[in-house]
Image: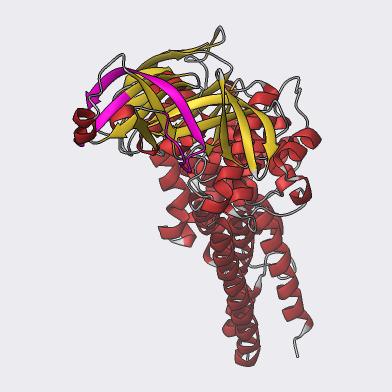
Amino acid sequence: MIDLDLTARAGAFALRCAFAAPTPGIISVFGPSGAGKTTLLRAIAGLTPAEGRIDLDNASLAALKAEERRIGYVFQDARLFPHLSVRENLLYGFARAADPRLHLDEAAAVLGIAGLLDRGVRALSGGERQRVALGRALLSQPRVVLMDEPLAGVDIARKGEILGLIRSVQARFALTILHVSHDLDEVAALADHVALIEQGAISRRGPARALFLEAPLSHRPDARSLIDGRVAAQQDGVTIVEAGETRLVAPRHEGEAGARVRLQVYARDVTLALKPPEAVSTRNIVPATITALETRIDGQALVRLETPAGPLLSAITRDAVSDLKLAPGLALFALVKAVAVK
Amino acid sequence: MLTSLELQALATSFIVSTRSVLIALPIAILIAYALGRFRFPGRTLLDVLAHAPLILPPVVVGYVLLSTFGLNAPLGGFLHRTFGWRFVFTSEGASLATAIMTLPLMIRAVRLSLEAMDEGLDEAARTLGAKALDRALSLHLPLAWPGILAAAILGFAAGLGEFGAIITFVSNIPGETQTLPLAIYSALQQPGGEAAAARLATLSFALAIAGLAASELLIRFGKRRLQ
């Protein structure tokens, strides 16, 4: 359990944040630039003076100095020490940790940086720098890992790789990760728990799947529902995923049968049919029941559905709503045009 | 070529200047570190005192040293009686005078290097559990080493040229306190000493330029390295 209630000032900006979330797991704080995300992380790390409570798994951190908090901070710009090799960077926190459990060899292997150990840090690519920064933080045996926009300096092709890595180290070492980002894709891929931050305050928070179904996230043009499933089989270039009480066809995703995957279904990719459609190319068609109808800020209709795969959102025109006489309680079929796997 | 007296002056200069760097460098690092990284009561006073030799007439510095470390002065007398240390009229005293005169330059070189450091690295080290002294030794000083090296070279080169403080404090004794500038001065006092003075002056000039160039190169190299 992480439980915060703190106030901090950075220049004219005031932060007043209170939230609690279960641990271990990935907690994402999502908000626009300037909302106070970095100030929040800095306050938790003790780098910006703050007042209030920071309780983490029954340890109280607020009264401790930054160097005593045992917080692994993965900075946006990595901040590797330029006078040290990759190995020496990785061992900087490790050498200062009491009773280390995670060791260099294991961390380097998991992060895929075993081949870089004797290099200097200046020649590393953005993705490699982020891996080394993550390794350095993990090896300091932290109580919690703080990540500030960890994908900012990583090129697009490598983003998915780093996201997968963050998820897998979290699971492997049962870490508590507090992650801040202004990128909804990053939050959707990582978060177990989400808090929304606006103008220095937490406006909403909750388990990721539930929060993505609620306003304001459900009213965004890129609104989506998250489905946590498991790989059932790999066949013909696609991956079959067990989701809730049904199976969905997803783009090919590496993973053993039984591996956990998170599917994202965008509201704009879900169309509705009153009768089971015939001869269509859509592979994922699930029976659904309308639970609610809303009008989005952008004028589209948002249809909330209950399906065997879990709750889904569908964004359609208001025209379609009246034509099909859609109403809560109506049973119909949801055609899921595309599923993204993370 | 150089006469034996001139070679002796060159050797004295090297010994005096080298020893003055050994005395001044640790002090310069400490003061630069304190001034560059901490706010404390008396900070301005320390800043002013450390930089005073830059604007004081060197003769005044020599005079202050004489009245502090002279055998009849309380501190000088105490050091002589207790440890057998004697500064007046010795090359050790010349080194002490040179160290104090070159301290401001050396502090500046170290401080520039420390201030060029990215504060973000210090924050990263703090989150990794490094306390203040630990960070000074594992992060700040290693990152400032080009500046520290530059300070040493600059202090050495500038020390070769010290005149006023040396001649006032420890006099002009060939083989003991007669450095290059003092030897030039003596040569000019003698009829027909112009040729010797010119040789020594050329030598001094070359040494000073070489030292300054080396120091500037190191400072630039260090700045590039920290970016």
Give the left or right position of residue B154, taking residue A12 as reference.
Answer: right
The single residue placed furthest to the top in the displayed view is A58
In which quadrant of the rendered image does the C terminus of chain A lie? top right
Membership of B131 in magenta stretch:
no
Q: Residue at x 73, y 64 (%)?
A: B15
Specify whether residue A35 is in view: no
Give the left or right position of residue A279, taking residue A253 as reference.
Answer: left
Q: Nearer the viewer, residue B196 or A200?
A: A200
Against B70, residue A97 (above or below) is above
Give the left or right position of residue A297, taking residue B79 as reference.
Answer: left
Give the left or right position of residue A240, taking residue A48 as reference.
Answer: right
Against A88, residue A323 (above or below) is above
Dividing the picture into quadrants, the one containing residue B55 is bottom left
How far across and down, in percent of the image, does residue B203 sit?
A: 65, 82
How far across and down, in percent of the image, does residue A215 sit?
A: 29, 24
Q: Which residues are magenta?
A: A276-303
Against B147, residue A284 (above or below) is above
Specify whether residue A76 is in view: yes
Q: Nearer the viewer, residue A131 or A54?
A: A131
How far across and down, in percent of the image, does residue A202 sit?
A: 33, 21
Q: Residue at x 69, y 53 (%)?
A: B22
How far across and down, in percent of the image, does residue A203 sit?
A: 30, 20
Colouring used for the render: secondary structure
Against A307, residue A85 (above or below) is below
Q: Nearer the viewer, residue B101 or A322?
A: A322
Dividing the picture into quadrants, the one containing residue B91 is bottom right
Dividing the picture into quadrants, the one containing residue A131 is top right
Q: Residue at x 65, y 24 (%)?
A: A171
Q: Nearer the viewer, residue B7 or B194?
A: B7
> Number of numbered discs present?
0
Membership of A299 in magenta stretch:
yes
